[in-house]
Amino acid sequence: MRYLPKSPADRQRMLREIGCKSIDDLFAPIPAEYRLTRDLKVPRQMAESEIIDYFRRCAEANAAGYAVFLGAGAYHHYRPVVIDSLISRGEFFTAYTPYQPEIAQGTLQAIFEFQTMICELTGMEVANASMYDGSTGAAEALLMAARITGRRAAVVARTVHPEYREVIRTYIQHQSVPVSECGYLENGRIDMASLEKQITDETACVLIQSPNFFGTVEDIPAIAELAHRKGALLAVSIAEALSLGIVKPPVEADIVSMETQSFGVPLGFGGPYAGVLATKEKFVRQIPGRLVGEARDKNGKRGFVLTLSTREQHIRREKATSNICTNQALIATMATIYMTVYGREGLKELASQNLAKAAYAASELGKQGRILFQGAPRFNEFVVQTKEDPYQINERLLQKKMIGGFPLRKFYPELGNAALWCCTEMNTREQIDAAVKAVAQ
Amino acid sequence: MRYLPKSPADRQRMLREIGCKSIDDLFAPIPAEYRLTRDLKVPRQMAESEIIDYFRRCAEANAAGYAVFLGAGAYHHYRPVVIDSLISRGEFFTAYTPYQPEIAQGTLQAIFEFQTMICELTGMEVANASMYDGSTGAAEALLMAARITGRRAAVVARTVHPEYREVIRTYIQHQSVPVSECGYLENGRIDMASLEKQITDETACVLIQSPNFFGTVEDIPAIAELAHRKGALLAVSIAEALSLGIVKPPVEADIVSMETQSFGVPLGFGGPYAGVLATKEKFVRQIPGRLVGEARDKNGKRGFVLTLSTREQHIRREKATSNICTNQALIATMATIYMTVYGREGLKELASQNLAKAAYAASELGKQGRILFQGAPRFNEFVVQTKEDPYQINERLLQKKMIGGFPLRKFYPELGNAALWCCTEMNTREQIDAAVKAVAQ
Amino acid sequence: MSDQDIKKATRHVNQNEPLIFERSSPGKKGYRLPPLDVPDVDYKKALGACAREDLGSMPEVSEMEIIRHFTRMSTWNYAIDLGMYPLGSCTMKYNARVNEVVARLYGLAEAHPYQQERISQGALRIMKTLADCLLDITGMDAITLQPAAGAHGEMTGILLIHACLSARGNPRKKILIPDSAHGTNPATAAICGYAVENLKSNAHGMVDIGALEAQMNEDVAGLMLTNPNTLGIFEQEIHKIAEILHKKGGLLYMDGANMNALVGKTRPGDFGVDVMHLNLHKTFSTPHGGGGPGSGPVACKKELEPFLPKPIVVEKPDGTLGFDYDRPKSVGRVRMFYGNFGMHVRALAYIMANGPDGLRETTEDAVLNANYIRRKLDGEYELPYKSASMHEVVFSDRLQAQKGVKTGDIAKRIIDYGFHPYTVSFPLVVPGALMIEPTESESLEELDLFIDAMKAIAREAEGDPEMVRNSPHTTRVSRLDETAAARKPVLRWRPGKAQSAGE
Amino acid sequence: MSDQDIKKATRHVNQNEPLIFERSSPGKKGYRLPPLDVPDVDYKKALGACAREDLGSMPEVSEMEIIRHFTRMSTWNYAIDLGMYPLGSCTMKYNARVNEVVARLYGLAEAHPYQQERISQGALRIMKTLADCLLDITGMDAITLQPAAGAHGEMTGILLIHACLSARGNPRKKILIPDSAHGTNPATAAICGYAVENLKSNAHGMVDIGALEAQMNEDVAGLMLTNPNTLGIFEQEIHKIAEILHKKGGLLYMDGANMNALVGKTRPGDFGVDVMHLNLHKTFSTPHGGGGPGSGPVACKKELEPFLPKPIVVEKPDGTLGFDYDRPKSVGRVRMFYGNFGMHVRALAYIMANGPDGLRETTEDAVLNANYIRRKLDGEYELPYKSASMHEVVFSDRLQAQKGVKTGDIAKRIIDYGFHPYTVSFPLVVPGALMIEPTESESLEELDLFIDAMKAIAREAEGDPEMVRNSPHTTRVSRLDETAAARKPVLRWRPGKAQSAGE
Ligand SMILES: Cc1ncc(COP(=O)(O)O)c(C=O)c1O
Ligand SMILES: Cc1ncc(COP(=O)(O)O)c(C=O)c1O
C-alpha cells in the first residue's frame, strides 16, 4: 500500500524485535471467533488515477456550471484563491488541535484573529473558536441561554431556518427545555404581539434569525427590548454572514450564533461549514467550544493558548458546557482568510453588490409574480409567489442550466406557490434576465 | 491595486522622507519627451473572478478530455498529485536561484537529488541542474562536444526530433560548426554505413536520439563504437525520458541530453519543460548550466552549494560554457518528485505498461495500415502508413474527441501518408479500439 | 542544554508576524470586485435603521501581506507533514493529497445542498458507496453520515438508544461509562438526558466483568465502551459484556475512535455492538485541520435503524439515488443538510486507495508500530498495564516523577527533539499518563528516532531534571502561562493596544 | 551575538531530512498503477539487447515519506512568501496565486503542443493577447514569445540583429557592452559569433557618450544596453545613444531585465531601442521557482520582424488564430514548440489583475521603495554613484571593508535578521557592491525593518566585525565551504556512503 512507509524487511525486523512470529500474534487479544478471515467488501485497491477518474465521473454526474439562485442557508459566493492556497499548507491542514502552544502558534494566532473578527462583525465581546455549523450552534446557543438564566423554555421564530429548528428540537428533546414557535407578519418579520405573549417567566431565550429565512432583516433592538423586559435573553442566528457587511450588527443580542459558510467556504453539498458562537464577556464561562486567549511565555513574549478549558468535556466531563471536542478549525481559518481579503471596505462593497443584485432580481421577478414580505428591509434573498408551481418552474429552469429558488411549500404550506430566491455577486444580470424569462414562460 | 501593500498615507510619508513632492519627481531622469502620458493599451484592471472566467473560457476553447495519441516530443503521462501539492509550497516556487546556501538548502538538496537520479537513469557520471528543454539541451550538447574535442563539425541523425534539429541549426549558425544529417534505414535506425562516411577528422560529435523520432530504439553501443573509433564523441538525446524505465541507458555515450517532460510535467501546450545534460566526470568543466555539489559548513555539517561556477556567464562572461542563467529549476523539482514517486520499480512497471499499450495499438492499427520500421525495438511510439491522408483521418478522429497521430509528411515527405502514434498508460484499450475503428472507417 | 542527542531537528531562522490587525491601514486592499452590472442601490436607504455604520477594526491589507501573514504563521506549527505526531487517541495518520484533490472537484465542491436530486447523483453516489463500505467495515446494518464529529456521533448514537428503548417501553435513566473513557462520553450522555455511572477497570485495564454485572440493571440504558479502550487494550471479554447488557435489556454503544486497530481484522457488529460511531478524521484519514472539521458517522443494528436521523440516502426503484425524509420514528436531524460531505469524499478516496488488502495492512502496521515502541520503551518508562497493546500504548511518568519530571515536562522536552508530544495525562486511570499512538504512517527510522529521543529524555530526567522542566528550549515561545491567561482572559485583539515586544 | 535588534525573526525548531536515497529500501512503494487492460508484453523480449537490467539506486519510498521529505526540505528555504527578497536585478515580486490557478486549468495545462489549431484557440488567444499587451508596453512593432529566459531572449535578439545587418549587407563583427552589464550579455554576444567590446561608464554611472562615439564604427553591430542599467540609473542620454548607433548603421539592443522601473511610464520603442527582451519572471511576476522557469519574449521594430523565430501566432482571415511557419527570413527556432506557454498564461493574468492603472502604480511603488531605502541608508553605506535611482540602488561596502567586513559578510549577517540578502558583488563596476531591489511588493513596515537591520549591521561592523564575519548564526548550516566543494566536486550521491552527522 503506497501510503505505508515500510519495507517487508522492516516489518520482519520489527516483529523479531517484538518477539512475534507473525503479525497475527499481535491480534491474539481479539477472540478468534471474531477475527475477520475474509476480505472486506470495499472497492479493490485503486491507482491514484483511477480514484480521480471515479470522482471526476461523480462530479460530472452532479451539476456544474449552473446558474444558482438558491440560498436558504448555503450561499454561493466567490472564493478568493488565496484561501485554498494557504489552507493547503500542510502546517495548517495536517495539524491537530493546538494543545501544545509552542508548536501550534500558527493555528492559535489564526483562531485568535478569527475570534476578534467575529466580535467586530457581530458586535459581541467574545467569540469561540467554532461550532460544527449554524444549526448546531443555534441549538447550543439555546442551551447556553438556559444555563445562564436557569430558566428552561425558549421561543424560536418560525422564520429561523427550518432545518435549524429541526436540529434544535433534536438537541433539546431530552433536556426538558420546551420550545414554542412564534409566527411572522405580512412584512416577514416576527409577530411581536404573539412573541410578547409567548415569553413567560420560564423563557430562557428568544431565538431569531436575521436576515431571517425569508431574507428579511429583523428589528433586533425591538425584539431585544421585549425579551430583556421579560428577563429572557435574545439569541440571534445569522445564516448569511455576508449580510454583516452592511446590516447593523445585533449588538443588543446576548448570544449570536453565526454560520460562516458565506466567508469563503465552498457550498460542498452542505459541508463542512463552520458555526461560531459569540456573546457578552460576562457569559464567557457558559460558552461551549474552544477559546483561544493571549498569554505570555516564560520570557514575556506574546503568544496564544487554548484557555478556559474547564468549561470543556475533557476536564468537566458530564458537567461540561457541551460535548463538543473536534470543531471546524480549518473552516474557521478559511473564513478568517476571507474576512482578511475583503476586510473593512470589501465586505461592505460586496454586501452592497449582493443587495443590488437581489433588488434587481426582485424587481424583475416581481413582474412575473408577487414579491412577498415587502414592508421590511431585505439583504440578498426574497420570496416570490407565482401562479405556477415553483417545482415546475424549476424543472424548466433546469433545462436551461439554472437552479431556481427554494420552494417554500414543504416548510411553509401557507405560502402556497412561493419560492425563496437568492442573488449574490455570482449572479450576472444576464443570468437574472434569463431566469426571469424562463419563469415567465 | 490589490497586490500592493501600501496605503495612500504610506506613500505620502515615504515621499516626504525622500523629499519629493510627487511620485513623478522620481521619474524625472526619464526625458520628458519619452514619458508616457496615456494609459497603456492593456485590458482594464480585473477582479480575480473575472480573470478566472477569462482563462476558463480560453481553456474551454481548447480541447479537454480528448483521447490523445500524440507524442512526438511531448508525452501524455499521469501526473501524481503530490507533485503540484509540493511544488506549490511558496518556499519552492517563490524562491530564487539558491545563491545563499544557508537559506536555500531545500532547493539545493532537491537539485542534488535530481542530478543523482539523472545520473542513475542515464548511466552518466554527472548531470547539471537543468537546461531550458530537450531541444536547446541538444544544441548545447553539440557545442559542448566541440569545446571538448576542439573539432568543429557534427553529424546529426535525421531521426532526431525535427524541431530539435531546427534549434540546433539556429544555435550553431554563427559558430562555424557545420552539421550534416544522417539518414535512416528500413528498420528506423540510423544508417550506419552512411554515418561512417559522414564522420570526418573534424567531427566533434555524432548526435542521435533514442528512442528516436519514430519511436525506434537505436543500437547505441554500435554507434558509440563507430564514433569513438573516429575520435568523435557520441551525444544521445532522449525525448521520452520514461523509456529509461526499461530501455538500457546510453552508458556508451559521452553526453546525454534529456527532456524530462515525461516525468510529471504537464503538456502545457509545449512548456515549461526541462532539459538536462549529463556526461562523464572528465568533461564536467565543459558542461553548461548550474551544478549543485556537496559541501561542509563551518561546523562540518553536510550541505549543498552551487559549484564550479567558473564555467558560467556571471564569472566567465564571454568565455562561459553557455549564456544560460535562469534555468528550469522548478520543473526539475517536479521531475525529481515524479522519479521519487515511481522510483526503482515503478518506472520499470510504468514503462512496461507503455510498451504494452503501444504494442497492442500497433498490432491493431497494423490491420488498417502498414506499421513501418518493424525490424528494431520500439518503446511507446510507432509509425503507421495508411492509404488515406492522415490529416483527413485525424479530422475524423477529432469528431469523436480523439487526437490522432502526428502526420510525418511535413518533416519526412518520403514517408507519404505516415503518422507517428503514441500510446501511454493514459490510453485505455477502449480508447485504442475506438481510434482503430475510426481510422478504419 | 546539550544538542548532542538531537538527530531529528535543528534550529533555524523563522519569521515573526504580528496580528493581522497590526498590519492594517486605511486604503490598503486585498480585493477587487467586478463592476456592478445591475442598477446600484444605496444600501443605507434600502436598509434604513438596519444599515450598518462601519466595520470597525476589520483589517485592510493587501494580498501580498495576506500570503505572508498566513505563510509565516503556518511555519510556527508542527504537522503530520513534518513528522511523527503520536497523539494517543487522535490517530494522526497521513492525509493523502489525492483526497484533497477530489474533494475540490468543481461539481462536488460547488454543489448546493438544495439543488435537485437529479443533478446531485454524483454526490449521492459517493455518500451511498461510503455508507456501504463503512457498513461492511463495522459489520452493522444501517448508518447515517450526518454527524459532524465523534462527539456529535456519540450524541446521535445515544439518541438512537434512547429512542429504541423508548419504543421498547422505557428509555431508562443511566449510561455506564468506564473510568478510562474520553470526556465526550459522559458529556454526551448528559446532553441526552442520561445520568452517568462510572464503571471501574480491572487490573488488566479492561472492563471489570464482575462490576459490570453488579451495576447492570433495568435502569441502565447502555454502556459506552471504547474498544480497544483508551489504554490501547482490546476488551477481550467483549462478547460477555454485550451479553450482560443485552440480557438486562441494555444496549452496547461503541466509541469507534480506535477503529484504526480493528479495520479489516474484526468487526464490532460481529462482537455484539449495537451502535457505534466512526471518526472519519481519525481512522479514515480526513485531515484534522488544526482541530476540525471531522465527521462522525453512526452505524447501528437493524432494530435501531428506524430511529436514524433524517434524511437518509436511498436507492429508488428507477435506480437513481435520493434522500428519504419520510422517517416518522427518526430522532430528528442532528445537523442541517447531510453532514460534512467533503469529509465523506475524502474518506471514500482513502478506502479506494487502500482496498481490502491495504486497509488490513494499514491496521497491521498501526498495531505493529505501537508494539514496537512499547517493546523499546518498556523499562525506561513504566508500563502500568501489562495487557497486550493494540494501536497505542500508555506509559506513566512514575519513574521520572521521582525526580520531579512529569509527563507534561517530558512532552515539552520531546518538542526539542523534533517531535510532537504524545497525549498528556489521558486516560485519567493512569496517573501521569503518556499515551502514544504512532499510527501506521511512521517509518521504522522515524520510530527509532522517537524511541531514542524518549530514552534520551529519560536519561536527562535523571541527570538534569531542571533542564527538562524548563523545556522546550528550541521553540519561538516556551511555556506560555496558561494559568494567567485563564485568570484574566484576553480573547480578542483590541485597537490601541501596542504591539508586544518580541513580536 | 546579541539578538536585541532582531525584530523580524526568531529561531525555531526545524526538521532534519536526509537525502531521499538514504530513506529508500526495497519493497517500499509510492505508486500504484491501474491494472493493464491490454495483453502484457515481456519487455525484455521486446527490447532484446536494448532492455535495461535494473534502475540502480533510484529510490523506493512511500507517499508519506515523499510528502515529508519535500515539505521538510522546503522549510529550509527562504522565499518571497516569507519576506522581502531584495535581490538586485532579480525583481523578486509577489507571485499571485490566481496565476497559478489559471495556469493549471485543465484545457490549458493538458494541451498537447501538436494538437490541431482548431482545438487550441484558447491557448493561441492567450499568446496573442499577451503579445499585444507586451507590444504596447514596450512600444515595439513585433514580438516572439518563444525564448525560455532572459539570456535566451538576448540570444534571439542578437540573432535578429545579425540577420538584419546581414540583410543590409554586413553582419559586422562586434557588440559593445557596458562594463556594468550582466554576464549573460557578453556570453550571448559570443554565442552569436560576435566579439565583445567593453564600454566604460562615466562618473555618473551612465554610458560615456564620448567613449561610445569613439568606439562606434562600421565594425560594430550594436550595443547591448540595460536601461535602467544595473546601477539602477536611467540612461538619460538614451536617445543620443540610439542616434550614435543608428547613424553608423548599428542597432540598439535593450536588456529589459529592469523593465519594472519603466512599465507604464515610458516605452523603449519610443526612445530608440530596436530590439529588446522582457523577463516575464521578473517584471511580469511569474515565479522564479528556485532558479527557473522563466520566459524571455523578444520585441523588435518593423525592420527586424521578418527575422523573428518561427512560428509566430497570426490571425487568419476567418478570425481564428494559427501558427505561421512560412517565414523564409526567420533566424530559425530557438526552442521547440512555442516557448514556456505556462509563463505566458501567468504573465497575462498579472497584466489583467493590474490593468493600465495598476501597472503604472506598480512601477511607481517599485521606484518609491528603492528611493526610500536609498534615502535611509545613504551615509550608513557608501553610495558610489549619486545619480538618481530608479527601481534599485547600489551601495558599496567601502566603509565596512575598513573593518574587514565585506559585502558578502553583510549579506550573511542580514540572514540573521530574517531577510534574504541583496545581490552581492554585482555590478562589477562597483567594488564590493550591495545591489538592493525591493520591488513594489514590500510594505513600509518591511522596508523599515530592512533599513533598521542594515543600520544595525553597520554598527555591528564597527563594534564586532568578527561576529559579522562569522554570520549567519541562526541558520541550520552556516558558511558552507564553497572552495573545497569546487576543488573536489561531489555532484551526486553514491550508495554505500554513510549518512553524514548532523543530518
Ligand atoms: C476515544 C475518543 N472518543 C471520542 C472522541 C471525540 O471525537 P471528536 O473529537 O471527533 O468529537 C475522541 C477524540 O479525541 C476520542 O479520542
Ligand atoms: C540585467 C540582467 N540581464 C540578463 C539576465 C538574464 O536573464 P535570465 O536569468 O532570465 O536568463 C539577468 C538575470 O538575472 C539580469 O539581471
Image (spheres, coloured by chain):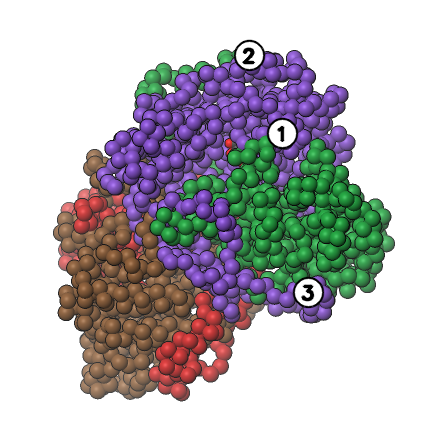
Chain colours: A green, B red, C purple, D brown
Residue beneath label 2, please? Answer: C210
Q: Residue at x 37, y 33 (%)?
A: C406
| Residue type at numbered disc 1 | Ala
Image quarter (top left, top right, bottom left or bottom right) of the C terminus of chain B: top right
Q: Residue at x 65, y 50 (%)?
A: A255
| Residue type at numbered disc 3 | Ala
Q: Position of residue A355 (x, y in %)?
A: 69, 63
Q: Quadrant of ligand 2?
A: bottom left
Say the numbered circle drawn on residue C68: none
Residue beneath label 3, please? Answer: C51
Say which of C411 and A254 sits in front.
Answer: A254
Q: Is residue A139 above or below residue A281?
A: above
Number of other residues with Cα within 10 Å of mark 1, as a class: few under 14, some 14 to 19, many 20 or more: many
Are tags 1 and 2 found on a single chain?
yes
Are tags 1 and 3 found on a single chain?
yes
Query: Which chain is indicated by disc 2?
Result: C
Q: Residue at x 52, y 43 (%)?
A: A308
Q: Quadrant of residue C164?
A: top right
- Report whether the residue tagged 3 is closer than 8 Å to ligand 1: no
| Residue type at numbered disc 2 | Gly
